[in-house]
Image (cartoon, rainbow, N blue to C red):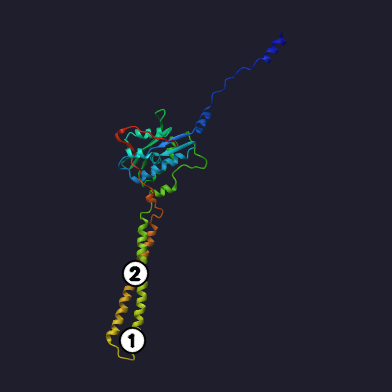
Amino acid sequence: MIALALSLLVAAPPALVAAPPPTAAAATAAQRTTALRVAVLDPAASPDVPPRPLAALAQSLVPEIRKLEGVSAIGMAEIRDMLGFEYQRQMLGCSADDQCLAEIAGALGVDELVTTNIVLVKKSYAVTLKRLDLKKARVVQSESLTVEQRDGEELLAMVGPGVAALFPDRPLRAGKTRGVEPAVIRRLNPPPLPRWAFWATAGAAAVALGGAAMSQVATSNAVDEYDRVAARSQTTVVPASDLTGAADRVRTLEGQRNAFLYVGAGLAVAAGVQALFTDWRNDRGALAPPVAPLALEGGGGLQVAGRF
């Protein structure tokens, strides 16, 4: 009997053991590997916010979000490029509630929206960043920052920490660092002079110095002529008017030469100084203000084909 019981026990299939629930670390790791598609709206700002810092902020948010692991981001400029010609023809600008932008983002298949609101209160910026889940229609994360207004770089300095606060579950991709690229910061406060101003001054200097060179040749010829008249007066009778005329011509040409030389030298020095303050990289033109938000005529719905 005992032998039979033992044989049945050995032959019986093992009992099923329930798997332990996933740990928080495992859930976080799974979340990080899930692809997340994000649309970044243009910052909404009060009218007294300067356009160049606002444009720099708008150009910095999408690249900063793209540094995050498992996140693909698209900005409004790219969304506008993806829209068809017929839709562009019917479009005027988005309403303040951004409903049509949310429709665009949903049509493109994004999971979340990132919105930015900036208000200038006295001498400080109040910045609110929000991360919105389109499918669940809720705010996933929100971050409010206050920075003192200076030269605009203070807004760029908050991009890295702000994105990190919006996406605490998303680490940086390998080899990436937080913060705005130096090239964008350079565009914010570029040298004040356009390139054409330098070339205009340098060209004027070249013309003046060329005039000085030509006047010098004419002066040398006039001096030679005066010397010939003076030498001839030693052996023959030469009218006094010939001698004084030759001397006057030398003095006139010398004055022209000196005037051209002084003007050319002054312009050359001015061009050298201008070169130190010239926007050689066209950074001022590279930082264009954000395009006004899009809207539909009559507030109608929209259909957009494509995904990213």
Residue 141 image offset from top left, x and y in percent: 42, 32
Q: Is residue 189 visible?
A: no
From the viewer's side, name the closer residue of 301 and 194: 301
From the viewer's side, name the closer residue of 222 and 163: 222
Residue at (37% x, 75% y) in the render: 217
Question: In the image, what residue type sits under mark 2?
Answer: Tyr
Residue at (46% x, 39% y) in the render: 66
Location of the C terminus (image quadrant) = top left
Q: Which residue position holds label 1?
A: 230
Question: In the image, what residue type sits under mark 1?
Answer: Ala
User: Residue 144's image quarter?
Assistant: top left
Find the residue positioned furthest to the bottom: 235
From the viewer's side, name the closer residue of 240 and 193: 240
User: Residue 91's image quarter?
Assistant: top left
Residue 168 image offset from top left, x and y in percent: 46, 34
Residue at (34% x, 69% y) in the render: 262
Say whether disc 2 or disc 1 marks the residue closer to the N-terminus: 1
Location of the N terminus (image quadrant) = top right
Q: Which residue position holds label 2?
A: 262
Q: CA distance from mark 2 to mark 1?
A: 31 Å
Is residue 264 depicted above or below 227 in this figure? above
Task: Count residues near mark 2 (Cα–Cα under 10 Å), then give few for <14, some for 14-19, many for 20+.
Answer: some
Residue 94 image offset from top left, x and y in percent: 33, 36
Residue at (34% x, 88% y) in the render: 232
